[in-house]
Amino acid sequence: MNQNITGLTIKNLRKQMKLTQSQLAEKLNVSDKTISKWETGKGLPDIALIESIAKTLNISISELMTGETVSNKNICGNVLKTNFYSCPICGNILYALGDAQISCHGNKLKPLTAKEKDMKHELNIEINDGDIYVTSSHCMEKSHYISFIAAISIDKIQFQKLYPEYEINSRFSISGVKYIVAYCNKDGLYSYKLNR
């Protein structure tokens, strides 16, 4: 936590809410001098107050500490604009319908950028009886493997988590699917547009 960034964030959000330092201090049960100290970068809020400050200012704790506020302009979300995130520590896979601020194990995660398929990450995609069958000869070793495959349509995501030392053999309903994404733990996210 950087005292200048956090202080400036508190000041800007307080002003946006049209609160004086005294009014904010009253809401947080601290003195207006304490608020002034934070806003001028001469001190940091006590760790016990962080959650209360974030709640009072209507932001996340992460936004308060980094000074990077996130606003979601797309209220309803758009499944075709899904962003995927992968934690480098635990391998956790997360996704959001649009921009989001996501962290895991204390790391702020950036959305994975999908690359066009290449020969090394070729998927065999077969369509049969209303289903999509996905297989691949990509290696599935503990140090290098496909972590997940997802089928994206305009109204849903079909997701399959994959594990090292197992074959890639996924099946999805074809209903509305526009593209398939696959995530290689070493090389990143790859996109495969369905040509139907």
Image (cartoon, helix red, strand yellow):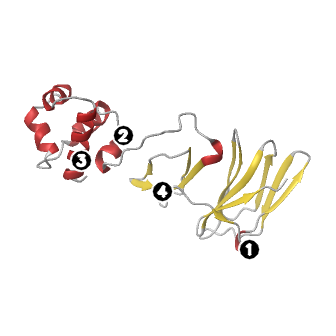
Residue indicated by mark 3: 6
Inter-mark Cα distance, 2 to 4: 17 Å
Could you tell me which secondary element the residue under label 1 belongs to? helix
Q: Quadrant of residue 195?
A: bottom right
Is there CB contact under 8 Å for labels 3 and 1? no
The residue under the point 13% across, 47% down is 40
- Local packing at callout 1 (Cα closer than 10 Å; few below 14, some 14-19, many 20+) is few
Left or right, 15 with respect to 22, comes to: right
Inter-mark Cα distance, 1 to 2: 42 Å
Amino acid type for the residue under numbered disc 1: Met
Could you tell me which secondary element the residue under label 3 belongs to? helix
Inter-mark Cα distance, 1 to 4: 26 Å
Amino acid type for the residue under numbered disc 4: Lys
Residue indicated by mark 2: 60
- Local packing at callout 4 (Cα closer than 10 Å; few below 14, some 14-19, many 20+) is some
- Local packing at callout 3 (Cα closer than 10 Å; few below 14, some 14-19, many 20+) is many
Residue at the outermost bottom position = 119
Residue indicated by mark 4: 110
